[in-house]
Amino acid sequence: MTKASIQAVAKEAGVSVSTVSRTFAKPDLVLPKTRDRVLAAARKLDFQVSRSAAALKSGQSFRIALLHADTIDVWFNANVFRGLNSVFGPAGYDISVYGLSNARERHEFFTELPVRRNVDAVIVCSFDIDPDEVSRLKDVNVPLIGINTPSTIGLDGAVCIDDKLGMHTAFEHLISLGHRNIAYVYGAPDDTSQLRFSAENRLQGLIDAAAAHPDVTLEQIRCSGHEDTTGAALAQLTTMSPTPTAVCFQTDEMAIPVLYRLPQYGLRVPRDLSVIGFDDIPFSAKMGLTTLRQRPNDLGAIAARKALAAMEGPLSEPRFETVAPQLMLRDTTAIAA
C-alpha cells in the first residue's frame, strides 16, 4: 500500500503543504477549524509523520507517557486514551501507558524516567502527584499536562471536568421540578484512590447547592467500597422517613443497578422517585437515565493539543481549562408528586 504524502493530505484538506506541516509541528499557530480539517484528512489517508526522519532532525523520541492509577480499560481512561490518540497518532507520536497502582511502581517510574529521558511529554490522568514527583518530572524538561488532576501546581497546562458545577446543576434541576426531599448516594474511596478528589468535589457541589435552599432536606447515603453498593443504597432509600422523592447518584454505574431494582420495592421511576446520575456512560441512554454528561475523549484531545503546543514553547492562555458537564434530560426525572 502506497504511503500517503504530505501533499496528498494538503490536497484533501484544501490547505497548503506548509499548513499541514505547521499543524503537526506548531498546532497552536493553526486555527482550530483548519487544524481539525487537516487532522481529519490525515486520518482518512492514514498519513503518519516520518518518525525516523523527524527524530533524527529534532532529537525527539516521538513517545508520550500517560500516567494513571487504574486499569486503562475502564470507561473514563479508555476514552481519555482515544482522545489523546486522535491527536497524537496523526502527529506521529506513540503513547506509552504507565499504570501506577502502588508505591513501588510510582517509585520506579519517577526514579527511572529522568535517567532514560525517552518521552517528549507526560500526561497525568486523574492522578495526584506530590511536589517531589513533579520536581522529578521537571528534571526531564518535557511538558507536563494534567487531565482531571486535583492540583495544577507544577503543570504546564491542564483540563478537567467541573464536578462541583455538575452536581450543582443536578440539584437545581431537581429543585426546579419541585423536589424538597432529596437523597445523594455516593461511594467512599479510600485516601489513596485517584478518584478521591472527584468524589469529594461532587459531594461538595451538592452540599453547596443545598445550602442555598434551607427548605430542602438532603440525605446522604454513604456506601463503602467493601459492601454491596446497590443493596446498601436500596436498603436506606426504602426505609427513610420521609421517603425521598428524588435521588442523585455519584456515578451512572451506581445509579443503573438501583434503577433496575427499584420496581421490586414498589417504587416507580419517575412517578414515585426521580433519579439522576453523573458521567453518561454508554448504557445510560438505553436506560433513559437523566444524567450529567462528561466527554473524557474530548479531555484527552484537549490535553494532547496542549502537549504538542507546549513542545514548541510556553502555552498561551488559558493554560488551565475547566469543562462544564452537560445535563442530559431523559426519562428518570419528573415533577414531584
Image (cartoon, helix red, strand yellow):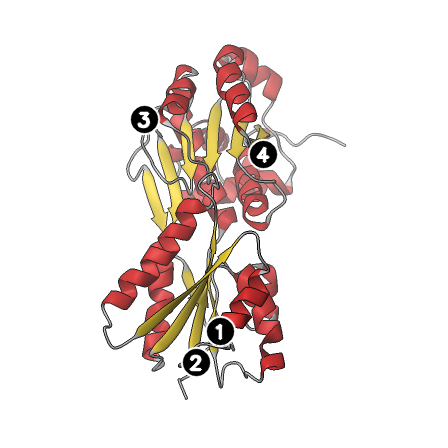
Kindly tell me whether residue 119 is visible in this rendering. no
At 41% across and 31% down in the image, what residue appears? 129
Would you call the spot at circle 3 few (<14 residues within 10 Å), some (14-19), or many (20 or more)? few
Question: Is the Cβ of the residue at disc 1 closer than 8 Å to that at disc 2?
Answer: yes
- Closer to the N terminus: mark 2 or mark 4? 4
Q: Residue furthest right?
A: 1
The amino acid type, in three-letter code, at marker 4 is: Gly
Answer with left or right where residue 92 lies relative to residue 134: right
- Closer to the N terminus: mark 1 or mark 2? 1
Question: Is the Cβ of the residue at disc 2 closer than 8 Å to that at disc 3?
Answer: no
Whole-percent x, y for residue 255 in the image: 53, 66
Q: Secondary structure at mark 2?
A: loop
Circle on res. 89: 4
Residue marked by disc 1: 237
From mark 2 to mark 3, how far is it between C-alphas? 55 Å
At 57% across and 29% down in the image, what residue appears? 98
Mark 2 or 3: in front is 2
Residue marked by disc 3: 314
Question: Is the Cβ of the residue at disc 2 closer than 8 Å to that at disc 4?
Answer: no
Answer with left or right where residue 135 lies relative to residue 283: left
Image quadrant in which the N terminus is located: top right
Image quadrant in which the C terminus is located: bottom left
Circle on res. 243: 2
The amino acid type, in three-letter code, at marker 3 is: Pro
